[in-house]
């Protein structure tokens, strides 16, 4: 039986942190320390009430170093990172300075060259950096990847990706609404979809942006095996009327040659499965993160061309 591993968690009061806490618990491991500048962290009592909690990164860093130097049985083996996007790079480095592997939420970093620098840190420390890319583990996505891989080698598929997740005014005043901190909407809510698309359909040949604003972004990707029209928004008005009338604020759709890919369910344990693979040494690393980070970095720097060419049909909604 494998020895229980010690974990620390950065960004422990955030939305996604409970999935990491559950993953640590369900894989038979222990959370020994957590960091967040906010102290609304009662959720931790459901998982690891005995974990040490810090609100300043300096004290948290010192604590991890103390465990490393003086209490080796409590040394942190992995640091989970759920902090705001622009802090991921710094928090990965904090983990590696304390001789721990890093498990980071997407986007791993905001720019491709940040990955190059982190590769150097991996080589220097001997520790690994893992990215949570849980869509790759979703049963429907696995089945689609196998179907495309086993299909005609020269076939180019037509894909429409639509993701609307309604957000209130708070979003624009938080770090998420600051493109310098979040990377913008395509990075913040779209990066895992772009990862999934390149994972299935291959590398990018062409990247066109039709619209890019704070609340909506849309464009066209030509991949090795697909023509992709994509649309992302946090504006409630784009939720289809029949769903909005039922009080639904989120709409997610992927069609391949007109056929809907059903993946509304099956998300509940994907973080746990991600952790299992990481602990086994089979997690998704820096090279896996490259394609989607390249895409979203390009989207931020491409001038939108408007409704020209093969654009997503939701762009016609005023």
Image (cartoon, grey):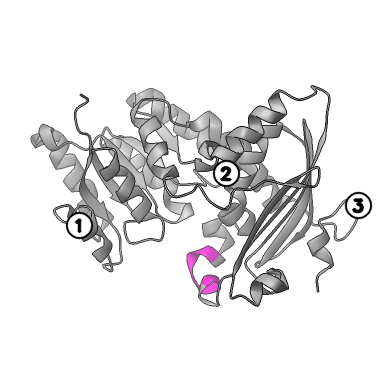
Q: Specify whether 161 is left or right of 70.
A: right
Mark on residue 111?
A: 2
The spot of residue 65 in percent (x, y) is 18, 40
- In terms of secondary structure, where does tag 3 sit? loop
The residue closer to the viewer here, 288 or 43, is: 43
Label 1 or label 2, whichever comes before in sequence order? 1
Q: Which quarter of the image is occupied by the C terminus?
A: bottom right
Q: Residue at x 50, y 32 (%)?
A: 286
Label 1 or label 3, whichever comes before in sequence order? 1
- In terms of secondary structure, where does tag 2 sit? loop
Residue occupied by mark 1: 53
Q: Specify whether 136 is left or right of 98.
A: right
Q: Residue at x 48, y 32 (%)?
A: 284
Residue occupied by mark 3: 309
Indicate whether 1 appears above or below 244.
above
Q: Main secondary structure of the magenta part?
A: helix
Q: Specify whether 246 is left or right of 83.
A: right
Quadrant in the picture for residue 214: bottom right
Residue 165 visible in the shown view: no
Q: Residue at x 66, y 70 (%)?
A: 243
Q: Identify the magenta region.
A: 171-176
How many angstroms separate mark 2 from mark 3 (CA)?
28 Å
Q: Residue at x 79, y 22 (%)?
A: 153
The spot of residue 110 in percent (x, y) is 55, 47
The residue closer to the viewer here, 45 or 152, is: 152
Q: Which quarter of the image is occupied by the N terminus?
A: top left
Name, please, the residue furthest toward the left.
Answer: 70
Indicate whether 93 appears above or below 55.
above
Magenta stretch: includes residue 166: no
For the residues bearing labels 2 and 3, Cβ distance under 8 angstroms? no
Name, please, the residue furthest toward the right.
Answer: 309
């Amino acid at each position: 039986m494998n020895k229980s591993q010690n974990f620390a968690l950065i960004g422990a009061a955030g939305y996604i942190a409970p999935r990491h806490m559950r993953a640590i618990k369900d894989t038979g491991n222990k959370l020994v320390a957590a960091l967040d500048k906010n102290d609304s962290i009662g959720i931790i009592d459901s998982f690891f009430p005995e974990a040490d909690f810090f609100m300043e990164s300096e004290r948290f860093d010192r604590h991890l170093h103390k465990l490393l130097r003086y209490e080796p049985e409590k040394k942190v083996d992995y640091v989970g990172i759920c902090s705001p996007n622009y802090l991921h790079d710094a928090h990965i480095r904090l983990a590696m300075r304390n001789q721990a592997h890093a498990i980071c939420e997407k986007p791993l970093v905001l720019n491709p060259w940040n990955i190059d620098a982190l590769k150097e840190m991996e080589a220097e420390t001997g520790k690994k950096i893992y990215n949570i890319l849980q869509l790759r583990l979703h049963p429907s996505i696995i089945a689609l990847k196998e179907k495309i891989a086993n299909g005609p080698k020269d076939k180019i598929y037509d894909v429409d990706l639509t993701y609307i997740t309604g957000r209130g005014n708070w979003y624009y005043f938080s770090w998420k609404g600051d493109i310098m901190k979040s990377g913008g909407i395509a990075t913040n809510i779209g990066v895992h979809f772009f990862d999934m698309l390149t994972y299935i359909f291959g590398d990018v040949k062409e990247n066109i942006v039709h619209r890019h604003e704070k609340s909506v972004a849309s464009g066209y990707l030509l991949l090795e095996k697909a023509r992709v029209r994509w649309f992302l928004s946090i504006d409630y008005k784009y939720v289809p009327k029949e769903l909005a009338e039922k009080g639904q604020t989120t709409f997610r759709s992927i069609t391949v040659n007109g056929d809907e890919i059903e993946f509304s369910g099956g998300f509940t344990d994907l973080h746990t499965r991600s952790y299992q693979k990481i602990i086994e040494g089979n997690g998704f690393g820096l090279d896996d993160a490259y394609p989607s980070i390249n895409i979203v970095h390009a989207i931020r720097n491409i001038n939108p061309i408007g409704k020209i060419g093969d654009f997503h049909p939701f762009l016609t909604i005023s």
